[in-house]
Amino acid sequence: MNKTRKIFFVVASGGHETERHYIDTIERKRTVDEASKFLAPQEIEILNKDYHGGPFAVWGAVPGSGNLRTWESMEPGDYVLIYKSGKVIFAAEVALKTRNSQMAKYLWGEDSEGKTWEYMYFLINPQETDVSMIKLNPYLGYSENYFPRGFMAIEQVKVNDLLSRYGDILSALQRIGQGKDLEKINEKAKRELVEIEEKIERAPTEHDEMQWRLIRLGKKARVDVWVPQNDQGKSYEGNLFKGYVLDNFQETLDVPVYIKNIDVVWKFGYSIKSAFEIEHSTSVYSGILRLSDLKALTPNSTYPLFIVADRDRRSKVFSELKRPTFDNPYLNLKETIGFLSYDKVRDLDESTKDQNANVSLEFVMTQTEKIS
């Protein structure tokens, strides 16, 4: 069953004090070691698991019946949008919530009434945005002059409609901020998806090798990794995939179930960070078609897609991407799909074996080739 994701507005209009708090715990972030002075061991375990030891952003609300009801309805995977002066300036995903007056006082002190922001929530996948409510309101079903107040949840029917029509809110905000209109998800594409079967030309072990190396690179990049359920029992050089990948995809309304069929998916929290299709069949068409179908189901997504194939197939991949089927502004595959050769994946993996190696999705993207 798909998880129902909620969207919360937080109004950051408290003057200099709110601005200072925002800089201290949203922009600058805090460490798990710092939080360990205040949180329970099981909460620290969640932070270490969800953040892979990295820093986190955190926000909170003061006690009050309205804030309490809103905070109690918040769950991991929900979205938080921070609003200020007519714009959404920040968006992120909830990883953990806790009521902790001591940590809140340490981070933010007390307000003029002696209250502290103890209804706390920790955030992952943060992104700064610059989206006016005037542009966002039509997609939420609000009037043009609507603006949020305080700490509030958007009506769930509006959230479900937004996510089912346009996909995840983080990608949607990026597109709106770039001055682009959102594309509606192609419902016809959902109905017409078919499983692709082709004759395998290369040894399955080569496919397994690429999956394993992308799994290992993902772990080095401090993201969660998914491979299809049927592949989780595989191993390469004695490394059983199941011990390194997610056993549950965490399905949500705004992430199409089809992505579970892609060879390797990098995630952080509930959000998709990238997807890799390993092309090992008699043509490169099938791998591109799978990514094309995925893009048709997520037209507003901003995460990169990759075709991984032998170096001698590079020109074939690029020529296929120029076909009218794929070369259209709705899919925009030429800008979205990058090419990684088998040798490049091997080089990336081998060159970052050191535990202190700096691996990130951004670094991997610099190593990919795009269609000219």
Image (cartoon, rainbow, N blue to C red):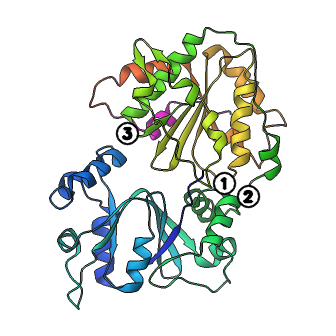
Q: Which residue shows up at 61% across the image and 85% down it?
A: 146
Asked whether, in this view, residue 48 is left or right of residue 267, the answer is left
Q: CA distance from mark 1 to mark 2?
A: 6 Å
Q: Position of residue 2 (x, y in %)?
A: 60, 52
Q: In which image quadrant can residue 348 be found?
A: top left
Q: Secondary structure at mark 1?
A: loop
**Res 61 visible:** yes
The residue at the point 71 percent across, 31 percent down is: 288
Can residue 343 be seen from the camera position used here?
A: no
What residue did someone put label 1 on?
Answer: 300
Highlighted range, magenta: 358-372
The answer to whether mark 3 and mark 1 are in CB contact below 8 A is: no
Residue 362 covered by magenta stretch: yes
The residue tagged 3 is 222
Q: Residues within 10 Å of mark 1 (few under 14, many from 20)?
A: many
* Extreme residue toward the left, this view: 37
Examine the structure image and report whether residue 193 is included in the region drawn in magenta.
Answer: no
Q: Earlier in the sequence, mark 2 or mark 3?
A: 2
The residue under the point 50% across, 19% down is 234
Question: For mark 2, what is the residue?
Answer: 183
Query: Looking at the figure, which quarter contains the C terminus?
Result: top right
Q: Amino acid at mark 1?
A: Asn
Does residue 66 appear to the left or right of 138 in the view shown? left
Instruction: Residue type at mark 3: give it.
Output: Arg
